[in-house]
Amino acid sequence: QQQVKQSPQSLIVQKGGISIINCAYENTAFDYFPWYQQFPGKGPALLIAIRPDVSEKKEGRFTISFNKSAKQFSLHIMDSQPGDSATYFCAADYTGGFKTIFGAGTRLFVKA
Amino acid sequence: NAGVTQTPKFQVLKTGQSMTLQCAQDMNHNSMYWYRQDPGMGLRLIYYSASEGTTDKGEVPNGYNVSRLNKREFSLRLESAAPSQTSVYFCASSKTGKGSNQPQHFGDGTRLSIL
């Protein structure tokens, strides 16, 4: 019940295309869903986050879509660029909690 | 502003050796965390410290100990290293307190190989 399932494991997208990464969770107590971006040799860094009271959040080319009833959320990267090539982790947490649950990660490669 | 600093960046140990990974943050954060990252398994929480003076087990605590030395520093110790502990270790911190969610800020990791 604590798992966050992330797919796909890897993704190759042409420059200018849309990258889509999906995540699903079980625990309905989760109320904070961040996405982290990790470049090789670096630690993960927060990219964008959403709470379940909204269905979508957009920051530049990055959009989170959230479906509370299905317990699913996804990251869309519009106009994908080679510089977006990285590993992306979805995560789930709950207010007052200290144990963020991370998905297994998606390695994105954007072809120039 | 350095953020979260981890030392060392790389280390090779022999089975049975001991070692302490160091972590310090300069953001005045309350909470600190230690994770390990293995291929295909995401980030798994080893131990965390919700606030200065407290530590708690995470998902995979066996074989590790931690010390929250002060608000800034949180160390991870391997008492008797095993090959299964070969991994990349990340320290993170957050401003999290009860009733709030704040993102975690990560260091750049320690790459540990145990032969």
Image (tube, coloured by chain):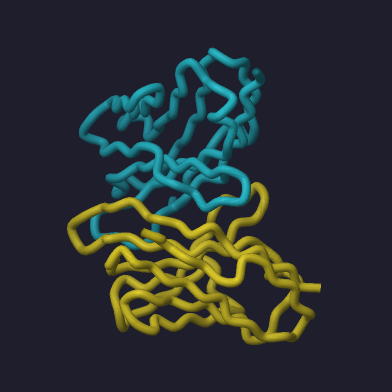
Chain colours: A cyan, B yellow
Q: Position of residue B39 (x, y in %)?
A: 67, 50
Location of residue B55 by image quarter: bottom left
Front one among A52 and A36: A36
Residue A35, above or below B95: above
Rendered-image quadrant of the N terminus of chain B: bottom left
Residue at the image position 40 percent from the left and 26 percent from the top: A62
Rendered-image quadrant of the C terminus of chain B: bottom right
B100 with respect to B8 (left or right):
left
Residue at the image position 34 percent from the left and 62 percent from the top: A98
Q: Position of residue B89 (x, y in %)?
A: 58, 64
Residue B87, above or below A59: below
Q: Position of residue B91 (x, y in %)?
A: 48, 65
Residue at the image position 66 percent from the left and 63 percent from the top: B111
Front one among B30 and A22: B30
Front one among B44 and A27: B44
Front one among B65 and B74: B74
State the residue lying farthest toward the top: A16
Q: Position of residue A77 (x, y in %)?
A: 46, 23
